[in-house]
Image (tube, grey):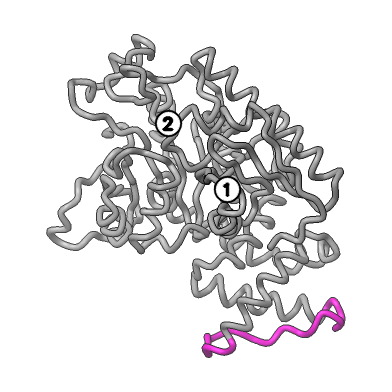
Amino acid sequence: MRNAGAVIHSHGMESCLATMINPHLKEFRITHMEMIKGIQGHGYYDELVIPIIENTAYENELTDSLAKAIEAYPKTTAVLVRNHGIYVWGDSWISAKTQSECYHYLFDAAIKLHQLGLDWSTPDHGPIQVVKGVPSVDCRMNVSKKARLADSNCNGKPFTRCIVLDIEGTTTPISYVTDILFPYAQNNVGRHLSATYASAETQDDIKLLRSQVEDDLKQGVIGAVPIPSEDAEKEEVIAALVANVEAMIKADRKITALKQLQGHIWRTGFETNELKGIVFDDVPEALEKWHALGVKVYIYSSGSRLAQRLLFGNTKFGDLRKYLSGYFDTAVGNKREKRSYVEITDTLGVDKPSEILFLTDIYQEAIAAKAAGMEAIISVRPGNSPLPDNHGFKTINSFLEV
């Protein structure tokens, strides 16, 4: 399934213990550790996610669950087996061995951080919030006095363990996306493709776009035009790609092929300081407060995870990624479908969906999240679309109201 040139299967103690610390989690997650850079496709600021499957009496019985994990996590180069070990693969034995060493280092670091009472899964690796020996943020015992005073919810009621934030119209003005990000991407598609055409990253973007356009042409999508074959002139291919991308942006399509390319274009804009991330003034303060209370905050946006990290990493308030524990995009599903929020719930490993609070400006997204069992609050910001009468959701004008 992955064209692996070599696979290393290890029973290393670290890989075994890392799956046993919390027997309910279906993933191992870690971020802000140098050795993450040794894992294919990852950097220091990225959150490394490794699926965990359950052990069986005989190794051949792992086949189905291993295959499902590989399919569900297209970017992973490893799968953990609880109480057993790990499979690591690469395009060569050197790649498999190097990554295996990095994975075991990270597992060892996670175990030692846990022994020190520190949370390896958060950007700053702060203290684990513990209640009766169970990691939680219910009526926190190990947070600062300032944080306890700031928390009006620690009164015997279950406190939200995770907050999932939408971006457009929730953390960030809608106008930023429609008036700044989209035009920047649209105006720079040709320049970006021409400058990076031969790179593996751009060729992967083109491959995704080709596949999407082929489907669009079959379905008669307006604006879709055929893309010349790979052996055609570079300029011909780019011209067709630009025409398709412009049509996709105009239609505001929430598709992975477009979002991935936009993220790469925006990355260039942030690197050259042509773009700056914008969030509402109350967002940094709220993120800091939630972080102090031990609440893990995640982003769920139709924009790619790269685009999300770029936005929050380059604001006038500085790098806000230190307050964020992870990112979700449309790879988990459409934001207006219940199953997407079920998938997020399973990924976060909470005991109950109601321990997750979802903040969005879109009524249909709130409906989907609520159907999955999450708590949902609608963000009312300047420029947002009006809500239907009797919508039945709590609304806020500022994150400081949460």
348 above or below 33?
A: below
From the viewer's side, name the closer residue of 30 and 179.
30
**Badge 1 is on which residue?**
58
From the viewer's side, name the closer residue of 172 and 103.
103
From the viewer's side, name the closer residue of 313 and 39.
39
Asked if the residue at tag 1 contacts the one at tag 2, i.e. Cβ–Cβ closer than 8 Å, the answer is no
In the image, residue 369 lies at what x, y percent? Answer: 31, 54
Q: Is mark 1 on a helix, strand or loop?
A: loop
**Badge 2 is on which residue?**
287
At x 30% / y 44%, what residue is drawn? Answer: 353
Mark 1 crowdedness (10 Å alpha carbons): few <14, some 14-19, many ≥20: few
At x 62% / y 46%, what residue is drawn? Answer: 79
At x 14% / y 61%, what residue is drawn? Answer: 389
160 above or below 1?
A: above
Q: Which amino acid does label 2 sit on?
A: Leu
Q: In the rendered image, which quarter is residue 348 located in?
A: top left
